[in-house]
Amino acid sequence: MGKGFNIIKNGLWFVKGLVKRIDGNDINGVAAQLAYFFLLSLFPLLLFMVSLLSFLPITTEDLLNVIRDFAPKQTTAMIEANLQEILSNRNGGWLSFGIIAALWSASLGMNAIISAMNRAYDVKETRPFYITRGLSILLTIAMILVLLIALIIPVFGEIFGIYIFSYFGISEQFISIWNGLRWLISIVILFVVFMCLYFITPNKKIKCLTVIPGAFIATIGWAFVSFAFSYYVGHFGHYSTTYGSLGGIIVLILWFYLTGFILMIGGEVNAMLSDKQKPC
């Protein structure tokens, strides 16, 4: 009885402390900043990745399928339409421009994440500008590689699985199973990305075990919020009626805001636990 009471007491204390940190560190404002930089980074990053797809056994449709797994339908349609329009108007020298634009713009988003994580850990940024910006660019490149891996694994996994299971005459059953596994693989990759962000970005030596709870909460929270928000937009939130042609952009910004908020929640959880875990 006493042990159960202590667990409840500690849980309430933790939630109270988390709410206090959310208010004290202005997480709502930080999430809004992150949403702006995510929006600024989105299309240069997608266009750069589309240019790389010609060298890989995957298509633009595979890339868009990853977005469809989580993004609201109205947002996905807007991204597809704008991406196709930009691709149809690009010139032959776009790739070199795309590398610079995508890395610089996306590094702004990563730089915002670095600042946000420093705020979560209550530390000031003392590293030189070229270090933080270089770290932002390296993390952007790493994120691109992770996204490409996330695209390649399902493609090759499905081909390999169908080839193996065809010997047993159950290739059709495998496709049904694979559709669920593909979503699980995306979640696992997302968890690893969150762990790396929480471990690398703060200007503080982090105990590696303390990034796991925040990464887990951020992964589950972001997947749940994305699906819930997508359902809300599809069934109740008629943003096109209110905002007209801007409805898709409004939905995208709100989704990015929720993403930034969840990302910061995970960082705050890790910061609260950072002094309670032993180093690796």
Image (cartoon, grey):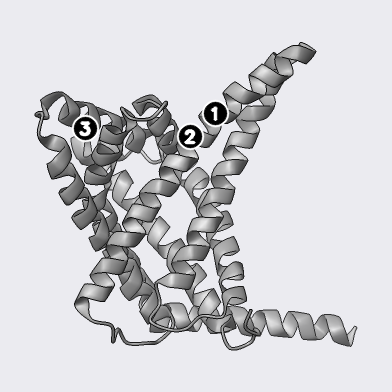
Q: Nearer the viewer, mark 2 or mark 3?
A: 2
Q: Are there few (<14), some (14-19), or many (20+) residues within 10 Å of tag 1?
A: few
Mark 2 or mark 3, which has the lower sequence index? 3
- Residue 51 location, x and y as percent? 25, 33
Mark 1 or mark 3, which has the lower sequence index? 3
Q: Is residue 12 above or below residue 230?
A: below
Query: Of all residues shown, which one is farthest toward the top?
Result: 169
The residue indicated by pointer 2 is: 152
The Cα atoms of the two marked residues, 2 and 1, are separated by 6 Å
In the shown orientation, is residue 273 left or right of residue 85?
A: right
In the shown orientation, is residue 76 left or right of residue 104?
A: right
Q: Are marks 2 and 3 in contact (CB under 8 Å)?
A: no
In the shown orientation, is residue 267 left or right of residue 133?
A: right
Q: Nearer the viewer, mark 1 or mark 3?
A: 1
On the rendered image, what quadrant is the C terminus found in? Answer: bottom right
SS for dot 1: helix
The residue that appears at 29% across and 33% down in the rendered structure is 50
Image quarter of residue 9: bottom right
Q: Are there few (<14), some (14-19), or many (20+) residues within 10 Å of tag 3?
A: few
- Amino acid, disc 1: Phe
The residue indicated by pointer 1 is: 156
